[in-house]
Image (cartoon, rainbow, N blue to C red):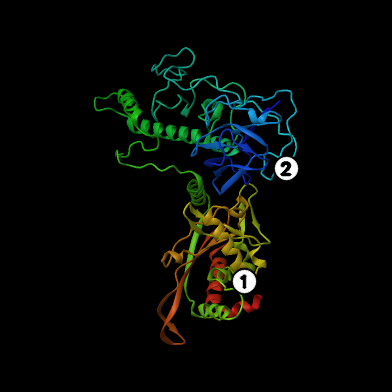
Amino acid sequence: MAQVLEFKLPDLGEGLTEAEIVRWLVQVGDVVAVDQPVVEVETAKAMVEVPCPYGGVVTARFGEEGAELPVGAPLLTVAVGEGAEGHRPAADPGTDGGAARAGEQPGAGERRSEGSGNVLVGYGTSEAPARRRRVRPQGRASGATAGSGTAGSGTAGSGTAGAGPSGAGVPGRANGRVRAAEPVDGPVPVISPLVRRLARENDLDLRELTGSGPDGLILRADVEYALRAAAAQGGRAARETGPHPDGTVREQALAATAGAAATEPAGVAGSAVSPGDVRIPLKGVRGAVADKLARSRREIPDATCWVDADATELMRARAAMNAASGPKISLVALLARICTAALARFPELNSTVDTQAREIVRFDHVHLGFAAQTDRGLVVPVVRDAHARDAEALTSEFARLTEAARAGRLTPGELTGGTFTLNNYGVFGVDGSTPIVNYPEAAMLGVGRIVPKPWVHEGELAVRQVVQLSLTFDHRVCDGGTAGGFLRYVADCVEQPAVLLRTL
């Protein structure tokens, strides 16, 4: 007899907690083999094809293309075993229905078929893990209040709900926080540890929220929306309270403001909104970049120093290398070789700050990240053990990772773990920049375009190939003298590549 098994979105590693469905690779009714890719998803780090650990007939899919699912949410159900070929779903494809719904126990009491032994975290080699039932919240935010309060009463503890950042469309507020009309009993339905931390850091009680995810799951978007709503209401209250021209407190004005705000989109309270404005979701790669850059600016006390360097001899050295037999050497590989040599002399910049332990952690290896612009946005692939590679090996690895980045095939492991970043923004035709440190690293070297410029060479004015080098660094790991010494050594190697012979 056929058995219906539910396959959930697995843990994709590297702390990822959600993914967006880009493209379904199977339809309901299709026969799938063990480890066959069934869906292509986009995480905050890469595009990933997710293989199914079961072989059988697809009976239901959960989520349309473009939908964002948390890790642990159901992806699809598969009928396996004898009679699976004749099994058909009980609901339309792509709906939440089907032979097995989220949180149910298909084939309760039966032993599950063996899994795939595949590599994604979250499912594996023998029996599928026991399913946990999610707790559905007892109530959703609505126009009615919890307990004995009445809609629109505004009394303390009534939990009124309206439709805007000031209370409407947002769960009711108490003590300056956003809360649901009815608190959730039992465990809080949250999977993501990032969501828990975000709520904890902002003193937001998750039990007071109603989740918008499957079965009331609280998503990051729910927490962020609640925080924006709280901030908007708090700011508006501060503006609207105070003496009214007739000598009274403007509570009536506050009520009017709350009603007017019912049509205000969250996050744009007080700003001009035109019908033609376009909203672009900050999610996927762009969302991850935004979060990381904001965190870098928020947590790292950075400083930038820069210097112009004569790159004529470096360009000549590269030309001589490429004139000889063997693979061509890229300019970024030579710059990477210079970086690793400089980090060996100034290891303070190949580090990170452990804020909890109040320690600086210096790495004994250089995992060199490099900025790569793709159609999906800016990504930073990482060359592992760059300090142990020569120019030829670096050239090959840069080419491989760049191709994978443009094709969206980078794995999470190839996008994380960097200790220092090289940013060649000269390819965009600009001379200089102030790079933002790639959190949690301690420094980034920026390289502008190499262009002919007037330059004093050997006491005479000449036209030379000049480049501007910028170093942004975490001032907690070193002082300006160390940063200046690093940058000067890099410039010396650019101007006189023979300097590198000392470290070869």
| Observer-nearest of 420 and 326 | 326
User: How far across and how far down the image is residue 345, in percent?
Assistant: 63, 70
| Observer-nearest of 299 and 336 | 336
68 over 390 or under it: above or below: above
69 over 42 or under it: above or below: above
Q: What residue type is labelled 1?
A: Glu
| Observer-nearest of 163 and 52 | 52
Residue at the left extreme of this rendering = 246
User: How far across and how far down the image is residue 493, in percent?
Assistant: 56, 76
User: Quadrant where the C terminus lies?
Assistant: bottom right
- Dot 1: within a 10 Å radius of its alpha carbon, few (fewer than 14), some, or many (20 or more) residues? some
User: Quadrant where the N terminus lies?
Assistant: top right
For residue 117, the mark is 2
443 over 202 or under it: above or below: below
Based on the displayed image, in which of its 4 quarters is residue 242 positioned?
top left
Give the mark nearest the N terminus, 1 or 2. Answer: 2
Q: Which amino acid does label 2 sit on?
A: Gly
User: How far across and how far down the image is residue 243, in percent?
Assistant: 29, 28
Q: Is residue 351 visible?
A: yes
